[in-house]
Image: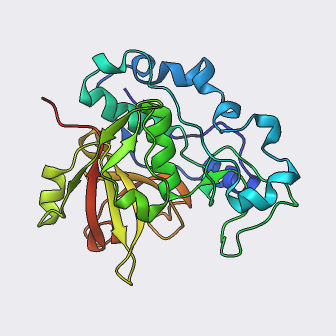
Amino acid sequence: MRLSLICLLSLSWLALAAAQTYKSPYSVKFSFPEEELIGDLLEGPRSDWKDHATVPFGEWDNPANQTRWGYWGPSMKQFDPPAGLAKKSPQWSRERVIATALRYVGYSYQHHHVPDWEPPADWPRDPEQKTPVGKGVDCSNFTGFVYNLALGILPSTGIKTQSEMTEAQGPGTGRKVPVKRIELPKSYEDFLKELQTGDLLFVKSNRGNVSHVVLWVGKIGEAPDAMPLIIDSTGTGAKDANGVPIPDGVQLRPFKRTTWYFTQASHVLRIIPEDS
């Protein structure tokens, strides 16, 4: 089954306009029904974006927190594991991560911890922010938030610390899971063979330091040109299979030989273990 890539949540008007006009040629085909994968994210307490932070919703815009939080806003809370997680297969967990990520397609690129936080007009601004201020999330907060909401596993959200993880908090509080590092596959074809859905692929800047992270969609992704897909939050620049610029923020994007996802790839971290 396919999940729609049209985000129906309220965004800043520019992000909303982009979401309405951009038609992605990419989709994801899951092997589990939507209700089984993310039913608890569609209805119930886990679906309430006002309950995604460590502080009550009424405190999100409290001016007293401006100095403490800066332009990052409130931090995300640690979620409990979803019901029955221990009995689910690794493939279910991988697909749930991607299905959760797709719920944020259309959100813009922002240096925020919580995607649905929309700072007031008088809130401190990131001086390097190039996209209009509104709801959104950056690359490593996106991957951390998705794993947290999907599985109750909260990776470090700073890009450097996330890229160096050997374990992550969760599922839920008081527990930890090991994180496996996978060195760079030798060839483009080896990426397709060795990476698994939900893996974290880290990308280096031109200076050689890790500066970006994406979620590997893998075999469940579908593209008109059969290109493998990733999902991440980043700025503009990439073009889709139709040659159309992909908007900034959270989107499905192609893993081409010519993009920095491949040419600047650093390494992979795997949080969900292989099938036993």
Task: Report x, y in % for residue 223.
Answer: 32, 48
Quadrant where the N terminus is found in the figure: top left
Up the image or down, 220 lies above or below 157; here it is: above
Quarter-of-image position of residue 37: top left
Q: Image point 35% across, 58% down: which residue?
A: 254
Relative to 123, 275 lies left or right = left
Task: Answer with left or right where residue 64 lies relative to residue 87.
Answer: right
The image quadrant that residue 132 belongs to is bottom right
What colour scheme does the image use?
rainbow
One can see residue 242 in this view: no
Residue under the point 23% across and 55% down: 181
Residue at x 67% of width, y 66% of height: 131
**Nearer the observer, 29 or 121:** 121
* In the foreground, 167 or 199: 167
Q: Could you say where residue 92 lies in the image, as x and y percent from the top left?
A: 30, 26
Q: Residue at x 66, y 70 (%)?
A: 129
Q: Nearer the viewer, residue 143 or 86?
A: 86
The C terminus lies in which quarter of the figure? top left
x, y percentage for residue 139? 49, 58
Return the x and y of residue 33 as percentages of the image width and height: 37, 19
Is any part of residue 254 visible from this angle? Answer: yes
Residue lying at the far bottom of the rendered structure: 207
Label count reads: 0
